[in-house]
Amino acid sequence: MADVQPLRALHYDPAVVGPLADVVAPPYDVIDAGQRAELMARSPFNVVAIDLPQGDPDPYQAAREQFESWQLQGALVRDEQPAVWAHTQDYTGPDGRTLTRRGFFCRVRIEDYGPGRVRPHERTHPGPKEDRLRLTRATRANISPIFSLYSDPTQAAWQALAPATRETPWGEVTDADGTTHRIWRVADPAAIAAVQQATSGAELLIADGHHRYETMQAYAEEVGGQGEHRYILMCLVALEDPGLTVFPTHRLVNGLDSDRQEALAEALRRDFEITEVPLEQIAPAPGRGPLELGYIDARLQRPFRLTLRDQALADAALPGRSPAYRELDTGVLEALVLKGALGLSDEDISHFNGLFYARDTAEALAMVRSGEYDAAFLMRPTPVQQVREVAAAGENMPPKSTYFFPKLLTGLLFNPLS
């Protein structure tokens, strides 16, 4: 069961660093060199200096020294009393809908993955873990939060926090995507107790941040004993929150020689009904059931709709999997096409060898039109309920089966580990 605790947060002092908008940043794994330079130009205190450190010969030592210096300067201050932090994100999604997602920041005790505790929902790539472990050792803090989901059908936790959100927020930032992030510090013991009661029986499902969670598991074991290093900074959002949405991540393939092109064409003709559609309709509508995809390749440049001929094909390709997984679009595509027809291995998929991803239709089409990729598969979003069902069956989805939008910002709060 989840052990949810308030935290004595470390956070920026706007009186010293200026507007929060100048010092926060998107998640580290979406920032390229140009964006890093742009963020650093906003403020020498921008969190990207710590989260994506630079320094010769040891960037992690540079991060440690910078982080400590900011605390000595009073740019970062630590709360005397523990609190949970209510958080809202007003956003317009890729589908054009305007919504508000509600959650809260807290500390959560690190547990091994398993029923009733914490579950991953996707297979992870191996690369980022060592980098994040070295950064954690250097800073002895969680620099960015994990985004996790839990079930709260009556929204009891949010109801306990909602009164605080009628006041002026402690911090407010509108990011480059137009999402407005607001946080409120809630130190009222009764509200904290109500949040803990609402989450006491919860199983947590990691939505974003698998690598950082697994890094913190390793760090906690490395340090040993008990203490603050056994807890991780999380933002928890209820599965039932009306502002929680999931969007698709599209698949692109390359390296298709003539043999693999023919194998792909044969598999598509055999297993799918193929219908040409207008380009503006290539992305399939949200839904659940037998696999439905948009498809375009660099050779024909014609948009198609692919519909699985029979669910029995997916069932046969995924023996031993749960019913929810056998209806999972990314899982069925992986089994029948990526692994089946194209012969990609788990290692290929983990290391982007012949497979890449796009977050929106326009990006996927541009990558095929340019010839950079040979073909694109346009996916439906995975329904939240299906995410939950697959995790409850103890199964992990293929990488990037979900795209939870909006992302959390880095730099609103830090969680010291000592």
Image: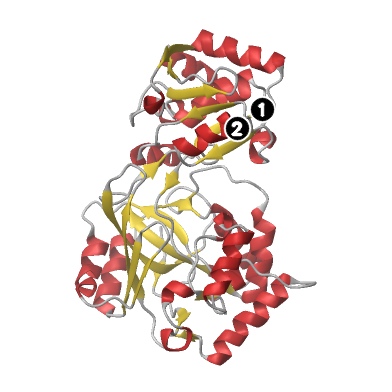
Residue annotated with mark 1: 344
Residue annotated with mark 2: 370
Tell me if residue 147 comes above or below residue 333 in the rendering.
below
As helix, strand or loop, the secondary structure at mark 2 comes to: loop
Q: Are marks 2 and 1 in contact (CB under 8 Å)?
A: no
Q: Quadrant of residue 344?
A: top right
Report the amino acid beneath label 1. Leu
Tell me if residue 179 comes above or below residue 348 in the rendering.
below
Query: Alpha carbon of mark 2 to alpha carbon of mark 1: how far?
Result: 23 Å
Is residue 128 or residue 35 the one in the foreground? 35
Q: Residue furthest bottom?
A: 73
Side of 312 relative to 336 (left or right): left
Q: Position of residue 265 (x, y in %)?
A: 58, 12
Report the amino acid beneath label 2. Ser
Is residue 9 or residue 282 the one in the foreground? 282
Is residue 368 or residue 306 the one in the foreground? 368
Side of 376 relative to 167 (left or right): right
Side of 197 relative to 376 (left or right): left
Tell me if residue 8 comes above or below residue 231 in the rendering.
below
As helix, strand or loop, the secondary structure at mark 1 comes to: loop
